[in-house]
Image (cartoon, rainbow, N blue to C red):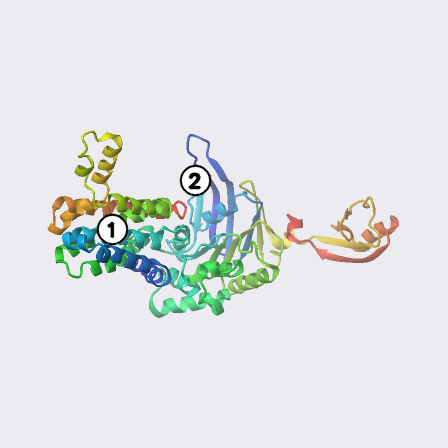
Amino acid sequence: MTSVIQVRSVRRAFSRPWGRPPVVAIAEATFDIGAGEVVCLVGAARSGKTTLLRLAAGVLRPSAGVVRIVADADPRRSIGFAPRDPAFPPGFTVREVLEYYARAHATGPERDAQVRDALEGSGLSGGAGRRATALPLADARRLLLAQSLLGGRRILVLDEPFAGLDAVTRRDLSDRLQRLVVTGGSVLLSSADPVGLERLADRVLVLRAGRLVVDAPATALLGGRVLEVVLDVPPLEPPPGFRITATGLEADLGGQSAESALAVCRAHRLSVRASRVRLKTLDEAI
Amino acid sequence: MGFLRCALAEWPFLRIRLLRTRLWVWLVLLLTVVLRLDRAAMAHDPLAAALLVASGSATLCVAYLAGARADRLALGPALLHPRSPGAITVGRWLAAWCGAAIAVLAATLHSGFGVAFASLVTAATMSAWTLALAWCGGNVLVGGWLVWLALMGEQTPEAVLAHPVPGPLRIAIAAALEVLPGVWRYRGLASAAPGATAHAGLWILAGLVLARSRAARSCGSR
């Protein structure tokens, strides 16, 4: 797979005034973003996700290491970056915001076509006349996505695009991102909450205290199976290998079969009402 | 070419803010106060009145076009597209200056070319200086500058120091009047005085450089 962004041994520290020691936001990070790939950067708050995204997008310069963007000399021509917090000029409508940004990419009919495509690509065609600063969060995030698509940019770096969104909007946005990837785009996105990223991510990066601790394909992380058991009466102590849940028990199956795990429940005289085997979710895997 | 296109991209700020905010109301109010309510002053010293309109309208235009917190926050996303902080700064300055120029031309309709020229250059200087203020400290600083203009706009340093015992406050005010853009100094623009022209040119340059550096900082370390 061709790499569109290469991050090699990158470190980023922010200096502080009054002689205080600098804050190291990224201690060490090395990874690639391939063409047609969706990479999810997961980590707790203040783990350095936003800094790493800004480095990958060429918005920040690394203190050490190299970020190579395999595209134009100006990364802003090939990488669309959507920050976490929506900020649009007051008084502008959605269409005017996009026209304002699109003027940096094209002129005349080409600019109009870019705005139209961005509106359609983000699902904002119906609300193009609304004031951008009065948009609800879901539409503001769509507008951030739309502006990152302007200029025919196929590499998107999105900071917390699902933060604060309901399940329906999350699904709609991830469908749109998947459609973009199908047509040859690449996406690097961050999230503090990995729930729901399973259906989108090709690869998962986990960041802890400024260090990349996991870089693995999502299929490898999500390969594990979990047995969920619904009980009439939950036990006081779970059987070995099980943990208590709201409706009963669950256990990582690992190499054993579901039948053998259920046999353990029966051996502990637990009345099993129902059971199912499911794949691990991303938050369980990391 | 790219710089010019990006600078001109700031033009919608003037159109949208003139049509959708109270900016036009304030400009009309300023013109009414200076030209209609203070007719005697206008008849006596049309240049001073025109320079006051230029200073006030430039400050108001910058406040509405660039000084709001949301406008300053929106600078970051604008720089995520291939445009330079310099182009944004020059474009926003030109947009604010054009807004002020509308008021200036209305105020100097019956005055001579010299008055109109001096007022337009004053508006350009005040726009650049106020833009730097706006992007350094927002509309709080711009509002403070407007109050300064209202209180000290027509004063000269000599008049402030005329007191037998000036005291440190008067000396500080006189120094500020001497250094900062001021209506008293730009009276010389009407007669193309070199000192006034150089002062205005330097403040336009300094204001734009400072505003550009603030705009660049809004998008990280680019």
- Total numbered labels placed on residues in the image: 2
Query: Can residue B10 be spotted in the picture?
Result: no
Left or right for A267, reference B89:
right
Location of mark 2 (residue):
A63
The 10 Å Cα crowd at callout 2, few under 14, some 14 to 19, many 20 or more, is: few
Q: Secondary structure at mark 2?
A: loop
Disc sitting over residue A177 in the figure = none
Left or right for A248, reference A36:
right
Where residue B178 sits in the image (x, y, percent)?
20, 39
The answer to which image quadrant residue A116 occupies is: bottom left
Query: Can residue B184 be spotted in the picture?
Result: yes
Left or right for A250, reference A187:
right
Where residue B142 sits in the image (x, y, percent)?
33, 47
Assess whether mark 1 and mark 2 are in contact (beta carbons under 8 angstroms).
no
At x 23% / y 33%, what residue is drawn?
Answer: B171
Q: Nearer the viewer, mark 2 or mark 1?
A: 1
User: Given the image, on which type of amino acid does mark 1 rest?
Assistant: Ser
Where residue B111 sits in the image (x, y, percent)?
14, 58
Q: Is A4 or A173 nearer to us in this picture?
A: A173
Location of mark 1 (residue):
B55
Q: Is B153 or A249 nearer to us in this picture?
A: B153
User: Given the image, on which type of amino acid does mark 2 rest?
Assistant: Ser
Where residue A80 sits in the image (x, y, percent)?
44, 57
Compared to B148, does A39 lie above or below? below
Pinpoint the chain carrying mark 1.
Answer: B
The 10 Å Cα crowd at callout 1, few under 14, some 14 to 19, many 20 or more, is: many
Compared to A112, does A4 lie above or below? above
Pinpoint the chain carrying mark 2.
Answer: A
Q: Are marks 2 and 1 on the same chain?
A: no
Q: Secondary structure at mark 1?
A: helix
